[in-house]
Image (cartoon, grey):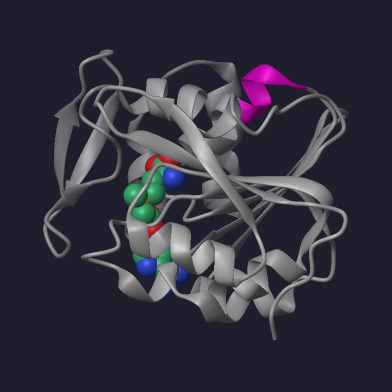
């Protein structure tokens, strides 16, 4: 796996199998704050589902932003979890590194759990409901299975009324599938490119199409 320095000076890796980087090269950490954490309105006392945890930057940006968070993270590749041990940012990223190593982390502010395995299966083990979901797979072209309606319905059913999902993709197929699963979809911010990211809302009145 090749280490890549992105334009905001934060580090990411290039995955050979997918031929994609784990983050936007316009700024890895910038992407976490501006496409995931900001638009999902992360604040104290939220329950977050971080799908495709990777180096854990989205969870990291969340714990930099708010306290008393409960985060459940899903990831299927041990190699990227091990590579997070080579990244040094600050004391909050040390929490992410500990989570990547031990699969649990708990202190007075953060209750974090990481489940290893295919997210399409591991999501079924989860009993709780979430206020916020970060959806961050590789691109729809390279990893279509994590952008399908069936998976989106599973996510939808794990979300509380009036909860928010954020994702970097604005692909037509992604937005159509989110809508088919019951979400209302709108543009997120444009960061590092002209296209917007996507914000998907589960309204209190919406129900998943079974
Ligand atoms: C774009 S990267 C995510 C970057 C990550 N959010 C971060 O901050 O580093 C996509 C991630 O999805 C993971 N992944 C791919 N297929 C998966 C699956 N079926 N279940 C769970 N994770 C998967 C990859 O291993 C990779 O870590």
- Nearer-the-camera pick, 154 or 5: 154
Image position, residue 126 (x, y; %)? 76, 71
Query: Which residue is painted at 38% across and 76% down in the image?
Result: 145
Relative to 129, 112 lies left or right: left
Query: Looking at this view, is 124 or 92 the one in front?
Result: 124
Residue 6 location, quadrant: top left
- 125 versus 13 height, above or below: below
Residue 125 spot, x, y in % from top left: 72, 78
Q: Taking the image as four quarters, which one is ligand 1 found in?
A: bottom left
Q: The C terminus lies in which quarter of the figure? A: bottom right
Q: What main secondary structure does the magenta stretch of the protein show?
A: helix
173 vs 164, left or right, is left
Residue 184 falls inside the magenta stretch: no
Left or right of residue 23, residue 147 in this image: right
Instruction: Give how far across and how far down residue 184 sits, in percent.
Output: 64, 52
Q: Residue at x 47, y 56 (%)?
A: 52
Q: Position of residue 39 (x, y in %)?
A: 59, 29
Given the current orientation, which residue lies at the most extreme bottom position? 210
Above or below residue 140? Residue 45 is: above
Residue 16 seen from this side: yes
Q: Which residues are magenta?
A: 62-66
């Amino acid at each position: 796996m090749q280490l890549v320095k992105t334009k905001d000076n934060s580090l990411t890796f290039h995955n050979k199998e997918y031929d994609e980087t784990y983050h936007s090269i316009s700024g890895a950490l910038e992407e976490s704050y501006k496409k995931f954490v900001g638009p999902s309105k992360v604040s104290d006392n939220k329950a977050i589902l971080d799908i495709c945890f990777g180096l854990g930057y989205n969870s990291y940006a969340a714990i930099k932003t708010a306290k008393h968070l409960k985060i459940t993270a899903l990831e299927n590749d041990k190699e990227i979890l091990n590579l997070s041990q080579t990244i040094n940012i600050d004391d909050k990223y040390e929490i992410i590194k500990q989570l990547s190593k031990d699969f649990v982390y708990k202190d007075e502010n953060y209750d974090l759990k990481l489940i290893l395995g295919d997210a399409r299966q591991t999501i079924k083990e989860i009993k709780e409901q979430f206020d916020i979901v970060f959806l961050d797979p590789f691109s729809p072209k390279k990893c279509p299975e994590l952008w399908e309606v069936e998976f989106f319905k599973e996510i939808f059913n794990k979300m509380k009324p009036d909860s928010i999902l954020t994702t970097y993709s604005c692909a037509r197929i992604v937005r159509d599938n989110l809508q088919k699963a019951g979400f209302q979809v709108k543009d997120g911010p444009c960061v590092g490119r002209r296209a917007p990211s996507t914000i998907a809302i589960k309204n209190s009145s919406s129900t998943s199409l079974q």
